[in-house]
Amino acid sequence: MKKITVLSFKEMKKRGEKITLLTCYDYSTARLLNEAGIDAVLVGDSLGMVKLGYENTLPVTIDDMVYHTKSVKRGNSTALLIADMPFMSYELSVREAISNAGRLLKEGGAEAVKVEGGKEMSSVIKALTDAKIPVMGHIGLTPQAVNKFGGYRVQGKNSRDASKLIADAKSLEKAGVFAIVLECIPSKLAARITRAVSVPTIGIGAGVFCGGQVLVTDDMLGLYSEIKPKFVKSYSNLRPRMLEAFAKYKDEVKDGKFPSKEYSY
């Protein structure tokens, strides 16, 4: 399979080809996603919830992101590798944002970073792109702002908020993003935003009219059951199958059935 780059996203947008993204946090999953032909892998700060056991994404550090991005890099050869900029790694100053994004590329091996926020983040994003760091934007429900929003709520439901999101998208495009994630917004609004910008939009809970889709891998495999948003489709239900395998292993060890002669030297 041909290596996917940020330029590939633009080419797919021109062809009208949908873009596929899934989150990834480790080497073995990266290899599987490559074999399946997924276009891009996102080392999301969602790892805070689905891998590190935090209540939300806020405690995730830049060191956490570098560590997991390095792991994914070793298993990835074809997909575009994008890493999230975690909470408070880019808001304080442009200098710190460039330094932290640079770590994700230099140490982690990421090929692009994702930054949450609209017009208010445009100057930071412009500085990152000027520093030759490709940036994916993210508007709508931005999980790092969960306390500001008062929870995980659909965004852009009234005309004022919808207009702001359209303006945000245009501002991010002007700042140089190569794509924009639209999270938890009405599908008709997502269609308007998709038409309003030249870069691809990637939906998560934003309907079918976006230029591509992204899901958290643990959600779509049925592994993470604590929170299940309406937009998550379970393409498999691995949790009960894993529980069954673990229980069977326990029983066979307790009963002296494993390891049998077949599995012994």
Image (cartoon, rainbow, N blue to C red):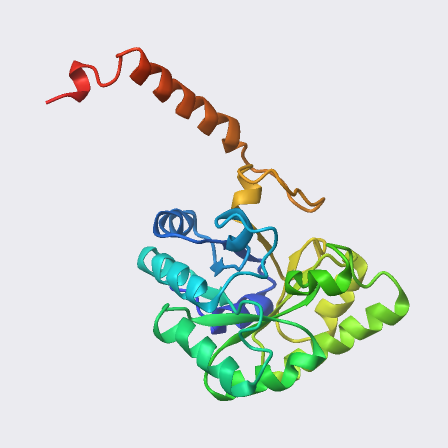
Any part of residue 80 in sight: no
Any part of residue 230 in sight: yes
In terms of image quadrants, where is residue 202?
bottom right
| Residue situated furthest left in the rendering | 265
Report x, y in % for residue 185: 76, 59
- In the shown orientation, is residue 181 left or right of residue 23? right
On-image quarter of the N terminus: bottom left
Q: Nearer the viewer, residue 1 or 52?
A: 52
Residue sitting at x 46%, y 77%: 100
Look at the picture and state if 49 lies above or below 168.
above
Residue sitting at x 77%, y 71%: 165
| Residue situated furthest right in the rendering | 159
Q: Nearer the viewer, residue 250 or 85?
A: 250
- Looking at the rendered structure, the number of numbered marks drawn on it comes to 0
Look at the picture and state if 237 lies above or below 176.
above
- In the shown orientation, is residue 215 left or right of residue 246? right
- In the shown orientation, is residue 168 left or right of residue 176? right
Report x, y in % for residue 261: 16, 14
Report x, y in % for residue 240: 52, 26
Residue sitting at x 31%, y 58%: 74
Look at the picture and state if 169 lies above or below 12.
below
Report x, y in % for residue 217: 52, 47
On-image quarter of the C terminus: top left
Residue sitting at x 73%, y 76%: 168
